[in-house]
Amino acid sequence: MAGVESDSAQIEVLRVFADAAGRFGKPVGVVRRRYVEHIDPHALAARVDGAETAIVGDPDARAAELRSYTATADLSFSAAAVLGAAWWLNVGSSPVTPVSRLVSPAGPAEVSVEDAQTWARVHPDWVRDITLHQFGSTDEIGTVDTADFADGLHLIWAFDDETRGAVRARMFAPAYGLAEDEANGAAAAALTAELSADLDMVQGQGSRLRTTWGSDGWVSVGGTVVEDRIVVL
């Protein structure tokens, strides 16, 4: 494994899908590819304490390549990584390098930052192997133990208010080395496609994810991105 020390790079850790007060959200570390080309990406993810790491290429014609990793897995698609990279390139990086498209191995996502929300238009076919489990009430969601899911990828969910698409959910991702995933936008997209409905989801401890369902089969996933910390390499 290559060493993870470098004098020329830092990972900016964001929290994607924060609530209205800037709390919660999924940690995502973002770094430009040119600074870490010779570093093992899984080592980078481990360095940021379990956060996903989004490695972005230099934008060209408002598009950039994106690769995302956990400490143990390569991710063909991660909504959190797409939103985190989109916000960082368009708003948080220095210098700002605007993009409207991020291309991950699963496919190209159209991205935008509108007011306090970052959005990505994604296809449900990019989401694989997530099992959806509907529960009868939101009270049941909090009683589930992480030990109940020893492998695979699982979203448990229940309607809080079906008429307005309000959902309470939790995500278990032992396949990615995470007993529980605080906020998983890919799972939110999968549920949106399953229900063919817009959703306002509270996931994990209190992360907030919003989705809109398109009649063409595409899903827009949105949320608030906030800065968390910097990890110097």
Image (cartoon, rainbow, N blue to C red):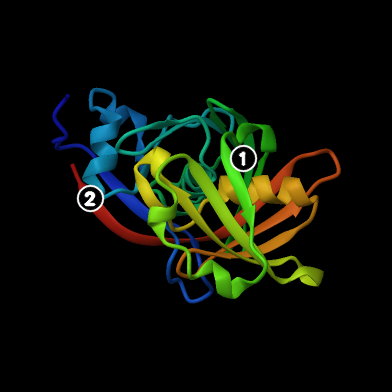
State the image coordinates of residue 22 (x, y, percent, origin top left): 45, 71
Q: Is residue 71 left or right of residue 183?
A: left
Q: Left or right of 131: which side holds 44?
A: left
Q: Residues within 10 Å of mark 2 (few under 14, many from 20)?
A: few
Residue type at tag 1: Ser
- What is the quadrant of residue 208 in the picture? bottom right
Quadrant location of the N terminus in the rendered image: top left
Q: Position of residue 47 (x, y in %)?
A: 22, 44
Residue 77 or residue 13, whichever sits in front: 77
How dense is the environment of label 1, judged by Cα within 10 Å: few (below 14), some, or many (20 and up)? some
Q: Quadrant of residue 215?
A: top right
Specify the amino acid type for callout 2.
Answer: Val
User: At 40% from the left edge and 49% from the top edge, which residue is drawn?
Assistant: 93
> Mark 2 or mark 1, which is nearer to you?
2
Q: Residue at x 23, y 27 (%)?
A: 39
**Residue 160, above or below 60:** below
3 relative to 190 in the view: left or right: left
Mark 2 to mark 1: distance in Å? 26 Å
Give the quarter of the figure containing the C terminus. Answer: top left
Which residue is labeled 2 in the image?
A: 231
Query: Does dot 2 land on a helix, a strand or a loop?
Result: strand
Circle number at residue 100: 1
From this viewpoint, which residue is outermost toward the right? 215
SS assignment at label 1: loop
- Residue at 62% in and 32% down: 126
Q: What residue is shown at x 45% (from left), y 62% (from top)?
A: 25
Q: Is residue 223 left or right of residue 179?
A: right
Residue situated furthest front in the rendering = 148
